[in-house]
Image: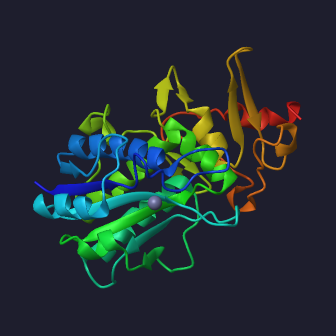
């Protein structure tokens, strides 16, 4: 049985980077990490975590724990920050190329790009080399994932959502399983059902919703948020009026400066939703012209 060392960056008195709207990196790292640990356990991998609550743990201590546990792979979770609010890529770091860490990094990076639809950095495979203490001092192959930029307003908003945190965790878990030559199984889906599961492809890229699509009386029910966000739209829930608000790309001005949906790299035209089984009804995103 493989053992994975999970390191959730920062914690306690060390918040890591902070977004313009106050989201703290340490909280994202922990939230994604907790789901990731559960997913790996469900897939019969052993896990060791360097922290499981909001506490400060020194890098020295983290490395000590990971080395003592004799893990097969180290995965460290972080969120990037930059002076420019435009920085928006997802990247996976290794200490050096040519080893097992690079293979793991590629698998995780590929799964992340496909799930988030965020772009990678200026590197052919999205893998970057950096001399980082944790990557250098751990004995097992080690990778460090920077899950987008907390300083990018749109990504900060996404990173805040539990559904998006789960999407990140599922992607990273898939990458890790892939690295070990194993197939990812999703909790709540029976092994036989796995092949029959309904996939959502937006412009050819698979998007993974927090709740799996279901076939109900000949209709494919697809979580709206997943599809709308993959198309670059913003979804808000107005609990008072029990109303779902969908703001299509370029119409962000109707929101009071909360979100600028100006990131054109996320906009896609002529999108379609394809269900593998039965007819698929487009979500109400396609009626959004009534909103503006
Ligand atoms: Zn960090």
Q: Which residue is depicted at the point 50% across and 51% down?
A: 25
Number of marks in picture: 0
Judged left or right of residue 135, residue 116 is right
Q: Which residue is depicted at the point 72% across and 56% down?
A: 267
Task: Determine the residue located farthest toward the front in the rendered image.
Answer: 13
Which quadrant holds the C terminus? top right
Q: At which x and y percent is residue 116? A: 54, 54
Q: At which x and y percent is residue 112? A: 46, 58
Q: Which residue is depicted at the point 66% across and 41% down?
A: 228
Judged left or right of residue 159, residue 176 is left
Whether residue 103 is visible, yes or no, is no
Q: Which residue is depicted at the point 66% across and 44% down?
A: 21
Observer-nearest of 229 and 96: 96
Q: At which x and y percent is residue 178? A: 29, 61
Above or below, 91 against 111 in this view is below
Which quadrant holds the N terminus? bottom left
Judged left or right of residue 52, residue 44 is left
Whether residue 152 is visible, yes or no, is yes
Observer-nearest of 190 and 215: 190
Observer-nearest of 161 and 108: 161
Q: At which x and y percent is residue 104? A: 31, 68
Above or below, 124 against 223 in this view is below
Q: How is the image coloured?
A: rainbow
């Amino acid at each position: 049985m493989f053992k994975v060392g999970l390191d959730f960056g920062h914690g306690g008195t060390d918040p890591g980077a902070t977004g313009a709207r106050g989201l703290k990196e340490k909280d994202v790292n922990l939230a994604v990490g907790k789901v990731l640990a559960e997913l790996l356990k469900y897939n019969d991998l052993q896990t060791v975590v360097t922290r499981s609550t909001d506490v400060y743990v020194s890098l020295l201590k983290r490395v000590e724990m990971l080395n003592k546990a004799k893990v097969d792979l180290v995965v460290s979770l972080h969120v990037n920050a930059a002076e420019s609010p435009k920085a928006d890529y997802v990247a996976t770091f290794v200490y050096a190329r040519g080893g097992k860490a690079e293979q793991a990094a590629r698998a995780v990076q590929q799964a992340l790009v496909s799930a988030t639809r965020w772009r990678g950095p200026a590197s052919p495979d999205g893998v970057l080399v950096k001399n980082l203490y944790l990557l250098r001092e751990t004995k097992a192959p080690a990778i460090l994932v920077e899950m987008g930029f907390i300083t990018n307003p749109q990504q900060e908003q996404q990173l805040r959502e539990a559904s998006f945190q789960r999407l990140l965790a599922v992607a990273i878990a898939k990458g890790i399983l892939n690295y070990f030559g194993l197939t990812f199984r999703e909790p709540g889906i029976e092994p036989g059902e796995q092949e029959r599961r309904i996939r959502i492809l937006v412009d050819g890229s698979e998007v993974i919703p927090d709740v799996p699509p279901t076939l109900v009386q000949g209709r494919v029910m697809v979580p709206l948020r997943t599809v709308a966000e993959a198309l670059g739209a913003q979804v808000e829930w107005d609990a008072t009026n029990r109303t779902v608000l969908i703001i299509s790309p370029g119409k962000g001005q109707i929101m009071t400066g909360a979100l600028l949906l100006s990131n054109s790299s996320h906009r896609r035209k002529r999108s379609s939703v394809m269900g593998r089984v039965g007819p698929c009804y487009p979500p109400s995103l396609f009626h959004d012209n009534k909103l503006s």
